[in-house]
Amino acid sequence: MDFLSAYDQGFARVAACTVPVSIADPASNATTILEQARACHDEGAAVAVFPELSMCGYAIEDLFLQDTLLESVVEGIGTVVAGSEELTPMIVVGAPLVHGSRVLNCAVVIHRGRVLGVAPKSYLPTYREFYERRWFAAGDDRRGSTITLLGAEVPFGPDLLFTATDVPDLVVHVEICEDMWVPVPPSSEAALAGATVLCNLSGSPITIARAEDRRLLVRSASSRCSAAYVFAAAGQGESTTDLSWDGQTMIYECGDLLAESERFPDGPRMSVADVDLDRIRQERLRQGTFDDNRRGVAERSVLGDFRTVELELRPPTGDIGLRRKVDRFPFVPDEAERLALDCYEAYNIQVSGLEQRLHSLEIKQSGQPKIVIGVSGGLDSTHALIVAAKAMDRLERPREDIHAFTLPGFATGEETKAFATRLCKSLGVTFEEIDITPAASQMLSDLDHPFAAGEEVYDVTFENVQAGLRTDYLFRLANHRGGIVLGTGDLSELALGWCTYGVGDQMSHYGVNAGVPKTLIQHLIRWVIDSGQFADPDGSSDTNDVLQEILAQKITPELIPGGTQSTEDSVGPYSLQDFTLYNVIRRGYRPRKIAFLAHHAWSDATVGEWPPGYPEEGRPAYDLAAIRHWLEVFVKRFFANQFKRSALPNGPKVSAGGTMSPRGDWRMPSDASAAAWLAEIERDIPRDIPRDIPRDTA
């Protein structure tokens, strides 16, 4: 496989095109369509979709029944077929065609000099401004049919699936305009029958707010069907005798907008995007009810009657770039409004989860349990503490019932300890300091550890003695004071195994951060500040002041003396590791695809979007060598540390990206081997690329 090839990485490029139409002039329209089809070929597209009745125009009314027009349409199709011989895309054009004794509103699928098949419109609107049944017959009863076109007999019906034999999982179905607006569209049945790319040729005259209606339907169809949906509407040149047209085009994939063009354009426009066929396949594998629905529908419908038309696409080879947005931070939206809403929901999911846990324990224990939490002054414990404070506020309990402890060890910095102290005091929680160095020194001595003899040996035992003692103290304090230990570890740490098992920070009574990735936590804290969760009536807040300072810190476990210990030097940049984490647990992607996407997302810090509030001076870039290295680290740590995740305490799922809970999103044997994943990294991911990858132009 070619690492740089989007097609080899499981993508297929599609285009939704709108072109100026010449009313009732198929010859001119054929020329225009071919020009745009060549442009799609130059873009490396596999599919090019044009509007409904694009060979002649949608609003020609009774001219649809004129022999001259109908014959000219067939001649125009012949022109497109002849001109397509050297072109890559499947070209899908709209045309009125005679079948039997009636004219039908059809989509003609053309590829490399031949007509592959013809799909008629199933549902004809004849209400308000629409009068299609005056001219056309419905095509829903033409399953299994054929039509003679340009001297060849080709498949005809709404039951056609166009399958590329040389592009895995590229299966195309075509429907026309109103077909999308009915309760059970043909595309829904086609998706259940295996179609991954659903195409809609639309006339759809524009009225106020109709564009939003179309977006709603297209997005919904792509989401429900776990598919890509390619939509092209008629535009410039259509008759405005009684109607107007906006030429809207768009491409959605599994509910996500990949591309759209400007509306009311002057001249041809196209939306181009690389649809992720791997994602579509993986979504269907994971959502078992998709196939359950197929079985249920098949028992009472015609799913088994779909016909497959095969073609050899011969897609472009090599590096053609990637025509889609790749989020650097898949857990963190780039749009300010969406990020604020995500933070609101995430914070309140955590708060309400903790509230319920405290309420249930109050009933069981006939008393109000206190919260016992270790506070280091770092991001995770800070966030867990402000979640706990809000939960107490909502339960109308005093914040003094939160017992926060700072537990300094051999490498605890004065700055972080000061942050912990100031934060606890500003929140009004019960706060105490317990120095664990005497107990840790005694334990290291009992273990005959070299550090006890004065040697500077800072191994895993040295680190875990401190981490374990902190957790041991917290649990005994919870026993002593009638409370629960609130866990502070996050989703990213659990994935990487960056926690001490058992009597360590892996364990708690309730892990409130367990569903929150590291890259989201800083934004949650920033949202808490911006939304005034702990602000005084005049807007001032000592809590917010210290939260701002905590956000600026370097991430460190502070377990090794003699300088600042960086977590990311050990486990990798959380920005990259969260990128990998999302694509493993939510998408099920293989290592080479994750590396391919990461390179497009992270190779140039100046290109693409960043989440709101992300400081410009802290925006990194990673070359392929770094991406490959940290991906290998992720795979090794992910497989080696499943035993920690298999014994996780309770904690709420927060992100649709997933969680590590063995009772929720992730179940995996602790003794599974990483060999296949590591072999793929070695085999398929180059250590570097001697030239730049073309950037996303979407």
Image (cartoon, rainbow, N blue to C red):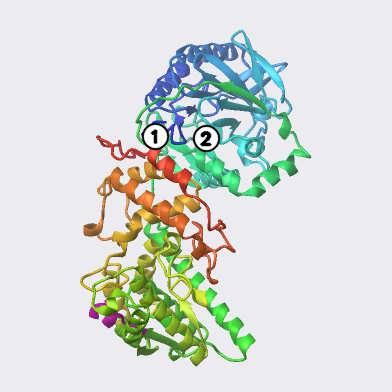
Amino acid type, mark 1: Pro
- In this view, 645 is above or below 36: below
Q: Residue at x 64, y 39 (%)?
A: 188
In the picture of the structure, the residue carrying the numbered disc 2 is: 243
Asked which quadrant contains residue 553, the reply is bottom left
Where is residue 133 shown, x and y percent of the image? 68, 29
**Segment colored magenta:** 406-418
**Quadrant that contains the N terminus:** top left
Residue 411 magenta-highlighted: yes
In the picture of the structure, the residue carrying the numbered disc 1 is: 265
Q: Residue at x 52, y 78 (%)?
A: 509
Q: Earlier in the sequence, mark 2 or mark 1?
A: 2
Give the spatial CA distance, label 2 vs label 1. Answer: 16 Å
Please say whether residue 206 is visible from this viewpoint: no
Secondary structure category for the residue under label 2: loop
The residue closer to the viewer here, 163 or 139, is 163
